[in-house]
Image (cartoon, rainbow, N blue to C red):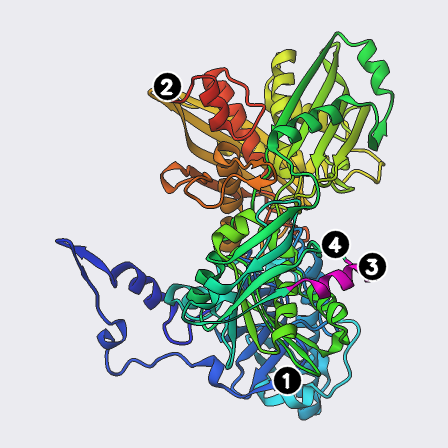
Amino acid sequence: MKSQKIDNFSRRNFLKTSILASGGMLIGFNLLKACKPEAVMPVDIESLNFNDFNAFIKISNDGYITVFSPNPEIGQGVKTSMPMIIAEELDVEWSKVNVIQGVLDTKNFKRQIAGGSQSIRSSWDAFRQTGATAKQMLVNAAAIKWNVDASTCKASKGIITNANGDKLGYGEVVKEAALLEVPEDVKLKEIKDYTIIGQEIVNVDMDKIILGKPLFGLDYKAEGMVYASVLRPPIFGQKLESFDASEAKKINGVLDVITIGEKVRKYIQLGKKNWTFKLSETDKVVVIAENTWAAIKGKKVLSAIWLDDTKLESTEDHDNILTKILDTKKSNIRREDGNVEKAFSTADKVVEKTYHSPFLPHNCMEPMNFYADVTADKIHLVGSVQTPEYAAAVVADMLGYDVNNVHLEMTRMGGGFGRRLYGDFVYEAAEISAVIKKPVKLISTREDDMTTGIYKPSVKYRIKAALKDGKVTSYHLKEAAIGSNMYGSIPNFFPAGCIPNYKVETGNYKSNITTGAWRAPYTNFLAFAEQSFFDELAIELNVDPIQLRIDLLQNVKETDDKRIEYSGQRMEDTIKLVREKANWGETPEGVYQGFAAYYSHNTHVAEIAEIELKNGLPIIKKVTVAVDCGVVVNPSGARNQVEGGVLDGIGHAMYADFSFKNGKPEHENFDSYRLIRMNETPQVEVHFVKNNLSPTGLGEPGLPPAGGAVSNAINAALGKRMYKQPFVKELKKRNVLG
């Protein structure tokens, strides 16, 4: 959308030229002063008077539109793409649209969650209907004014016309239209007639992000607000015995030191916990201060005694535990087709491999924080959370309020990746406010997030396949995980339905280390394991790795098995597109390719990574990606999601490692926890399969195949198979990297 202050063209030029490097000196200029005096600034949309139309739409008398975006904005772009869908069917010019983040409103909005890459998919039909219905009501109001039949009128770009050529703007009939009966059957646009959907639309928050304006949870401030920093158990498996706050209280700006935990314990006893609740029953020490600096400094000088409450676990223990789970016959069977064991007994060859990934923290750029103001009759919550409805419900139950008296406002999130699905920081902030009877802002540090947070489970997969007469006849996948196992639909992803004898089973170890969803849960590592394994099968069968997948997909195309989640045809089309775009098998000498394809979050993705050797070391140069996600609402936002997912997948597969020793995390900041660096990021080239099918997920599906594609490329270049993440650690063990 256009900025209210600077149009798109000016903004682009401003970004390119406002800061120039010259002789070591930075030179800047004021763009607005450089404009000609007669230049007219665009309308400040936010300053107009708007008339309520429905929960999603307001229309000003001037014909400008405000659209409320109801879902949390976590960087996935829904604050831009969701309003685009409404604006398309409403038939207005995007330059006249102003977007505002909606608040939690369970009466008017459904599924206000950022998770599972489902925001657009679950809202596509409803949002189209919302825009089209509003448009029809506006047309009906104009028809009544003209005393003509509504079928003789049409609307385009916010203007309604009749057969006589008369015209009315939306703003001229909005008040009357809002009072009309809501039509039940409205006509939706044909995709060929779209003017907004499918266009490159700038993120609606771009100006505020660039200019550093208040936008994120950490930016929120309120009158009378104090700050809180929480001291949690430094070791998983401990509880608070006692503490000494004397040194903390000496710090200028520290107001008080309190403990919380009682309300959490009582809430746990009620048995109302939902899946977003991940808090222990131990007390925690909280420093209350006038500012963040004093709060954090005060926490650092607290003296606390922690007692061991449950077993203190180490990574070495987990490794042995996971292996034992894989070795035991006891497990939870998630899917079983045919007779796996019989096929193994008659096979020409059996291939079996084991893959392992570590715990991983989420590492959001914006550390956890939240604002809470608990008063006698209501609760006001503001901040970055992916599950606002669940958060409000827990806070209400925990503090004994009616949920209707909880008002929750969402801010833009500086990353989430699943971490902000869990509202522990919301519940802590609410309890703190209830204790001190003041509005409070809970703030966490990077060390807090990394050492006392929630982690991707450590997982091992053992995969076994039978080969008979040049075909894969049996497939057995067993998962061993710390904390929790793959969710129900994953066993129905590829290669389910492709292989006649197929079995998926899981085993689990209940740990006191808190685990939860991490971008593309379980598939983030499972895709690497399976796609690496299929590459090995292709070598055993002496067939092209891509052709092996395509051949297997033929078996699922005509299936009547309703459990199957993916489309054989759509996956094949996606694979063929990436094969073509990456020139599979036709690269110059010294360029090595690796392929992987995966279906997750209702989206089919195929990737080909290219590696070159520099002084014998593998360098990832390029990743070509093909994606079938149905209709692409906003191509620029869609590309950003895929590119980000690929780089995230590569970075964590290559470098990320996290371990525990006697319950204590061994990494607490980026000085020891390795992420991908700018000079290590390859070019990512994204291609979308063109079709008219409803949109599917994009925030997560680009990540799972990335590790597999890179792993297979490493093997092509070095003849070294990766079975454990991070790859760099494995390559060093094998003396490939110094």
Residue nearest the observer in this picture, 514 or 386: 514
Residue at disc 2, secondary structure: loop
Left or right of residue 513: residue 294: left
Q: Which residue is mark 4?
A: 275
Provide residue 294's location: percent of width, then percent of height: 43, 66
Provide residue 215's location: percent of width, then percent of height: 48, 68
Q: Which residue is mark 3?
A: 271
- Looking at the rendering, which quadrant does residue 276 occupy? bottom right
> Which label sits in the foreground, 4 or 3?
3
Tell me the residue at 48%/38% (across/down): 651
Give yes or no for residue 94 being in the magenta stretch.
Answer: no
Characterize the local packing of mark 2: few (<14), some (14-19) or many (20 or more) Cα atoms within 10 angstroms: few
Label 4–label 3 contact, CB within 8 A = no
- Mark 4 residue type: Trp
Q: Which residue is mark 1?
A: 52
User: Rounded to the nearest whole Å, what is the CA distance between mark 1 and mark 2?
Assistant: 65 Å
Tell me the residue at 38%/42% (across/down): 678
Residue nearest the observer in this picture, 33 or 420: 420
Q: Main secondary structure of the magenta part?
A: helix
> Which label sits in the foreground, 3 or 2?
3
- Looking at the rendering, which quadrant does residue 182 occupy? bottom right
User: Rounded to the nearest whole Å, what is the CA distance between mark 4 and mark 3?
Assistant: 12 Å
- Looking at the rendering, which quadrant does residue 566 occupy? top right
> Which label sits in the foreground, 1 or 4?
4
User: Rounded to the nearest whole Å, what is the CA distance between mark 3 and mark 2?
Assistant: 58 Å
Q: Is residue 427 above or below residue 455?
A: below
Tell me the residue at 58%/23% (across/down): 723
